[in-house]
Image: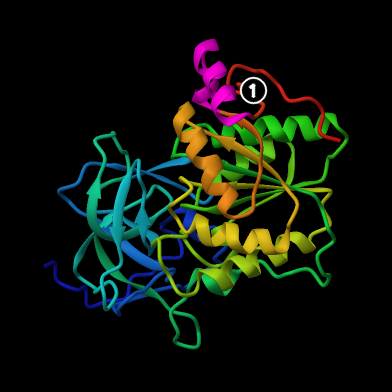
Amino acid sequence: MTAVPTDHPVVSRVKRTSVLRRVALPDDAQAYPRPAFEGDVCAFRLSGESKPMTLEAVSGRAMTVVPGELFLGCPGFRESTRWTVGAIPEGGLIPGQTYWILAECGVVGDFVGESPTEKGYLGQVVYVGAVRAETGQTLNIADYVTAPPDTNDIGAPVFLIVGTSSEVGKTTAAIAVLRALHRGGRSNVLALKATGTSSVTELHTYQDYGAATAYDMVDFGLPTTHPYVRDDITAFFGRMLDTCFAVRADTVLIECGGDLMGANVPAFLEVLRLKRPTLKVILVASDSLSALGAKTVLAQYGLSVSLVTGPCTDTPAIHSRTVALCDLPAINMARGSGLPPLG
C-alpha cells in the first residue's frame, strides 16, 4: 500500500480524462483523501512501475500520462467481452490503495480480467483523493447532467443500431445511416450511444458525419452502463430517452454499444420499446448464425429487424447465407454499399 499524502493537491490544471468532459472545476480544486464511488471526480497517480498510458482527453485526443503523474478520472464498472473487466470494490476506492485503469475514457476500479488484445490504457494507479465541492460533498459526473428540454416527446422517428459483439461495425453502420439521412433531407439528427462505455471520440465521429447533437451515458450521469444487473438502470434509461425524444430533431439515431446481452442492453430495449413501438432496427452481425440468433432475441422484445449488415455480408457466400437464414435484406456498409436516401 502506498502512503496517503498529507496535503490536498490542487488538481484544476492536471490532465483530465474524457469521462469528466462535462465537469467544471474551480481554479482551486483540491483532492481530499476519502472513499470514492461510481462517477466521483477523483485524482489518481500513475504507478511508477507502469509504462506511459494512452488515455482519452476531454477533447477526444489521445493523451499520454507518464509514470508518477497525476490525472483525473472516476471510479466505474466495465464488463467488456472484447477488452477489460473490472468493478468498484464494496466500500469504494480507498485513498492510497492501488487500482487499474479499465477504459481509455478514465474509468478506474479493481481489475478482474482482460482479453489478449493490446491495450494502451491498462495500467495501475494509486487513488489520491476525491475533488470536493464548496459544500464539502464530492463532485460527481451526475452533478452535470444534460437538462431536459421544456417539451414532451416530439415524435421524431428512431433508427436503432444493435450488434452481436463489440467491434463488429456498429459505428460504421451509424455513419452510413447518417449519410443516408442527410441525402434524404434530414439535417437535424440527434445521435445517442445509449449503452456500453463512454467515448467522446465516437461522439465526434457522429458529428463529423452530420449529427447535429451527440450524447452518450456521461451526459446523463454514468461513466458506463455496466455492470449487467443494476437496480437503477431502467429509470436511468427512461430519463435518457425522455430527454433525447424532447429535443427538436428530425431523427434520433441510437447505437447500443457492446452486444445484445451485455451493458444492460436488454433493459434499454425494454424501455425503448415502450416509448417507441415503431422504429427501424439495423442489425450488425459477425456471421450468419449470430444474425439469426440476434433476430430471434430482438423478436422477444417486440422488435423487427429492418436490415442486416456487418461481417455477415463480407463475401457473396456469407451474404447469401445470411439472407437465406434470416429472410432479411442485407447490405455491406463497410464496403461502401451505401443506403438509399432515408427521407
Question: What quarter of the picture does the C terminus occupy?
Answer: top right
Q: How many marks?
A: 1
Q: Is residue 150 above or below residue 246?
A: below
Residue in the picture at 40% in, 61% down = 228
Residue at the image position 71 percent from the left and 67 percent from the top: 242
Q: Which residues are magenta?
A: 310-327
Q: Quadrant of the N terminus?
A: bottom left
Task: Give me the residue at 33% from left, 59% from top.
Answer: 108
Q: In the image, is 52 to the left or to the right of 210?
A: left
Residue 326 position in % (x across, y down): 57, 31
* Residue located beneath label 1 in the image: 331
Residue 326: within the magenta? yes
Colouring of the image: rainbow
Q: Residue furthest top?
A: 316
Q: Residue 273: x and y, percent?
A: 66, 59
Please identify the dominant SS of the magenta region.
helix
Q: Nearer the viewer, residue 97 or 26?
A: 97
Of residue 327 and residue 331, the one placed in the foreground of this image is 327
User: In screen coordinates, is 110 left or right of 227?
Assistant: left
Q: Reply above or below: 124 against 24.
A: above
Task: Give the secondary structure at mark 1.
Answer: loop
Q: Is residue 48 visible?
A: yes
| Residue 229 vs residue 304, the one in the foreground | 304
Is residue 99 in the magenta section?
Answer: no
Residue 249 image offset from top left, x and y in percent: 82, 52
Q: Position of residue 80 (x, y in %)?
A: 36, 48
Residue 245 lies in quadrant: bottom right
Q: At label 1, which amino acid type do we have? A: Ile
In this view, the residue in front, 162 or 7, is 162
